[in-house]
Structure formats: structure tokens, C-alpha cells
Amino acid sequence: MFWDRDRLAAGDLPPVVIVGSGPAGVSLALRLAGQGVGSVVLEAGGEAYSPGSQDFYRGRVIGDPYHALDAARLRYFGGTSNHWTGYCRTLDAEDFEARADIPHSGWPIARADIAPYAEGAAEILEIDANVDRPLEGSVFVATRQASPAVRFGEKYAGFFRTSEIAHLCLETAVGAIRAEEGRITALDLRAPDGTAFEIRPRAVVLCTGGIENSRLLLWSNRTSPQKVVAEDRALGRYWMEHPEFALGEIRLDRPLFGPPRGTERLTVAAKHAAIRRHGVMNGLMHFQDVPRGWNGGAKAIARELACAAPALGEMVYTATDRTLECHQRVIAEWEQAPVAENRVALSETERDAHGVPRPELHWRKTERDYRTARVLMELLGRHAVRQGLGRVRVHDFVIEERLQPDNGWYSAYHHMGGTRMAATPREGVVDRDLRIFGLSNGYVLGSSVFATGGYANPTQTIVMLALRLGDHLGQKVGTL
């Protein structure tokens, strides 16, 4: 049921307090309820978007051009699922494995550890199973499912209104976490007007997103009697995105692959053997139709000639002050290697309305990012030529390995890392069960725990991790 803050402050709490109502928090509450374990989800925003709530996500980016932080995430019931486009895919099995050429790569779990939760995640996200369709040559088609873009707030509002075991409290933000003697002992809560009170939970799971999980823990480490993350050298670090850029165009004389089946979205991805051979990261490419603004009569003929002969095309299109794009744009996105310098930090000068330092995102692409973009286009071009499919035109900035085009393409809005899962606290913040190292009752959930990111949109893997954590907490509830 929906709780108000008075009910929450009364102190009769269920066993698990979940902070955040996005796909991670809601999926966890569903799984716990299915096992008869009570929970309350704390959502900092309301049931709908408001500019005042959204302002808490404002922050600064230091490094490469990036989206405004308060535009990349949403602070209300359902979280960032409220502007999710619905792409779904789990990480590949190879994405969990360590690579000798990628420092800090590898998860302490394998995909087999989350595979039992694929069916449950598919039901929540309203998708089918993933099936890859191989192509001849060096690339293959990877199916990315098209969820109807489930809005978790809309889909599960009725569940929370009627449930006697899963509860939701809106407009209740966690300002800080207090830890003592290896346990989280209290949460400092704030109402929108700044009114403060505390609760004393048995177990806490942070599901506030790929920036806010780090921000809250960094601030709590400054304010708590005992550090919440005892060994915090990795806290906030190894932050990752999926860089996303239009790398060129492709002209196909015949289809690259057949029509999609069911809800699949077809994209081209390099096989893992090719990725490792070239020393680059896992990535995908998909094609986007170019609007036809210059396609009538003689102009259409000129365009076709220009696209078939790029040198001539540049002269024709320069003379007419037009940009030459042939048939379909090639849009690529890829994983980043975990780099400690890419991190979430706290501002020393800017604070939000509750007095919490605003986030600073330090993010720069690396030489491996540039090389990955170039190799992906080379593999696509070779495949097109070998199979007689057509031709690929690569933008100059890709060949020159300088991914800073002024065309609005920066990344896919996928925030990963910062509280990464690892075998030891030297490498991460949570263990294989998502428990914060050094605490008996504190957990973190969401894409911030990703040790590496693959190229898959993170939502499906997040939901599978949530269901797995629900089973873990269900077994431990008596000892929390």
C-alpha cells in the first residue's frame, strides 16, 4: 500500500527498506512480496514529474562533452524507466569474463548465475527470450528486444496500492546513511520542504541509479560515525557509459539480414573472437534511415551518383551547401573499459536544497574508445564488400580517431559503475551478493554495480540482478 511519512516515521518497518522506485527497486519489491517478505520503497520524487524534484539531479560534468545530468535521469515514481526506449538484452556470457588486456575487467559472477531469472525478467519487461541470428563472416546479428517500454510507475502503481506486504512512500528522500559497528543503523530522511526525520531499518538496498548510488555513499562516508563503505578506494570510480555516435553511412544493394521476428530489433555486432583479436571493446551498430529532403527528379539522380562516387559527391553537395548522407546512418554504441579516473565525485562548492553536495561526473573517452569505433566500422565495411552487400562510408573523425564531432551524439544515457561488484573491496564496493563490503545489512542494486558494461542496454540485466537479490534476501530475512 501507499504509505505517508507519518506511517513511515512511526517506526514499524518491514524487513527491507528499498531506496529508489526504478526498475531495480520495483523488481526487488515484487520478488520479495512473492516470497512473503515485506518491504517499503522510498521514492524521493512524487507520482509525477516536477521541476523542483528534478533539480536535485543537477550537477557538473568535467571532461568530454556529455548530457546535462538532470536530463539523463528522472526523479519520480518509476525512475528513469519513464523515458526508457525499451531496448532489452542481457549481457553476453563473455562480458562477465576477465580479459588480460583490460585491467579491472571481469565480474565475480558468471552469466549462469543470473540466467535462472531470465524468465521472470521477461515477464516484468514484457519481452521474449533473446536469440542471436549469426551471419557469415566477421559479424553477426544480435537481437535486441523491443519491450513496450514498460513504465514501472504506471505498470505497478496498482500493485503497491493494494499490496499488504509491499509498500511505497513518495516524496521521501534519503539525505544520508548512518553506520556503526558494521551495520547500517539509520537513514536520514527528508521531505520536499526539508523537514528531517530518521528511521532505523533492518536491511537497506540502495537503488537510486548510476550516479546517485555513488553520491549518497560518498556523502554518507563523510557524515556517518563509521564509514558506510569501509574501504572506499573504489567508491565512485570505474564509471562507464556506452559512447554512441553516428560513425558514417551504409549503402546496401541488398538487405543485410531478413526482417525482424516478433519483438526483436536487429543490430550488427562483432563476434567476441574478433573483439579480442583487435583488442577493442564489445559494441553494436544499427542503421537509421536518412530523411529524404533532396530526392525529386534530376536531384535524385545527382544524389545517387554522389553516393556512388564520394569524391564527386563532396563537390556536388558542397556547391549546393548540402550535407551528403547516403541511404542509412550507421549508429554505433560500445562498452568502455573500467578506468579509475572516470568517476562520480562530490562538488566542493555546489549543494542541493537539502544541503547535500551536488554530483560531479569526471568522464573522458580513451584511446581504446576511438580504436573501437574505427574497428567496428572496418569490420562492417569488410563484411559488406565480401558479401557483395554494398559499401560503407566512414566519417573522417573516425579514421582520425577523434570522437568529438559537434553533432549532439555523446552516449546512450547508460550510467554504469561507481559501486561495482568485485571479489575484494580493493576492486569494488559490493560482493557477489550485492552486499556492501564490511556491512551486514547494506546492499546496492542497479547498473552502478556493473563491473563491465558490454554493449547491451542495462535494464534487462538490472531486473535479473534484482530478482536474484530478492531470493538472497528472502533466505536471509530471519538473520537481518
Image (spheres, rainbow, N blue to C red):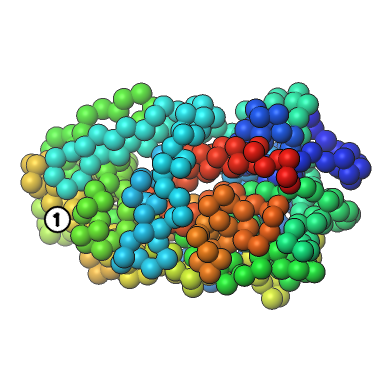
> Regarding mark 1 in the picture, which secondary structure is present there?
helix
Q: Nearer the viewer, residue 193 or 218?
A: 218
Question: Where is mark 1, residue-wise?
Answer: 310
Left/right of residue 24 with respect to residue 240 in the rendered view: right
Asked if residue 418 shows in the view, the reply is no
Left/right of residue 305 with respect to residue 43 in the rendered view: left
Q: Residue at x 14, y 55 (%)?
A: 310
Extreme front residue here? 479
Residue 26, image x, y percentages? 64, 37
**Which quadrant of the figure has residue 294?**
top left
Q: Nearer the viewer, residue 320 or 19?
A: 19
Residue 374, image x, y percentages? 24, 61
Asked if residue 34 shows in the view, the reply is yes
- In the image, residue 1 sits, relative to residue 326, either above or below, namely above
Q: Residue at x 41, y 44 (%)?
A: 111
- Label 1 neighbour load within 10 Å: few <14, some 14-19, many 20+: some
Residue 459, image x, y percentages? 50, 42
| Amino acid type, label 1 | Pro
- In the image, residue 221 sits, relative to residue 407, either above or below, namely below
